[in-house]
Amino acid sequence: MTLDLPTTPGIYEKILTLESGIPLRYTLSIPASFSEQQPVPLVMALHFGGTVTSWYGKGYLITLPEPALRELGAIIAAPDCPTQGWNNPISETAILELLDHLKNNYNIDEKRILITGFSMGGTGTWHMAARHPQIFSAAIPISSAVGLETIKQIKDIPLYVIHSRQDEVFPIKHVQEMVQLLKDNGVSIQFEIIDGVSHYNTGMFVESLKEAVPWLKKVWKM
């Protein structure tokens, strides 16, 4: 383990040069409880869509995953999407390379790695959960859509799905149908429906994500 990254609690803007030569900007949150001697959980947080300016994931990190998941004492990484979507092969490779980089620099508890994301990031969360259940021990997609082909691939990973009944972008009926298919397939899944929240009010999902913490602690046996 080589500590080339910060160990003091705080939020940092970092750049990782990928094997392809592409610079990947990402925001890193180090928890107040961080200790170099103790294994630490890791959260990979995928931002929503939009025009990706430098450290675009920072706004997402400080708005939703960091305040909601603070109790976990986890390192949280929020990369900037290097393409138009998180389920693009280039983006998928970037996530995996960043994950390896963090594992090489921190004492990451490899049994406690969460993938989560909102909207476009939620769609990426579904994608990564389907393709890499051996890496991620839990997945929390928020306010997102998922295709039938992805649903068919999902197994062996616990999911906690959060969606607003009033979502204007991804109608809840579709999400309900996909969740039911997963349940029918024996996938461990919890579905949290919230009321009165627009898809565009990301900050209004903090409490809902915070309510997933006891579930995650149970999954992680914390």
Image: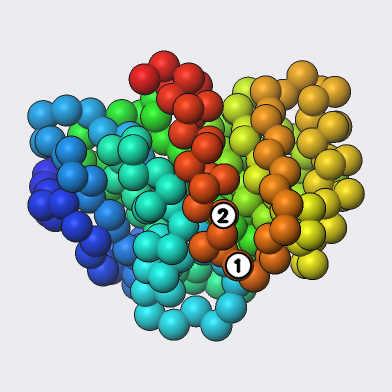
Residue designated by label 1: 201
Q: Splitting the image into 4 quarters, where does residue 33 fall?
A: top left
Task: Say whether residue 108 is visible.
Answer: no
Badge 1 amino acid:
Asn
Where 158 falls versus 88 (above or below)?
Answer: above
Whole-Å distance between the Cαs marked 2 and 1? 8 Å
Taking the spot 34% from the left edge, 38% from the top edge, the residue there is: 71
Along the horizontal axis of the image, is 202 left or right of 197? left
Q: Check the picture and name the quadrant holding the C terminus.
A: top left
Q: Do tag 2 and tag 1 residues touch (Cβ < 8 Å)?
A: yes
In the figure, 112 relative to 117: above or below?
above
Observer-nearest residue: 197 or 14?
197
Looking at the image, which is closer to me, 203 or 84? 203
Q: Could you say whether the residue bearing mark 1 is in a helix, strand or loop?
A: loop
Mark 1 neighbour class, 10 Å CA radius: few under 14, some 14 to 19, many 20 or more: few
Residue 69 picture location, percent across and down: 40, 44
The image position of residue 86, as x and y in percent, is: 59, 61
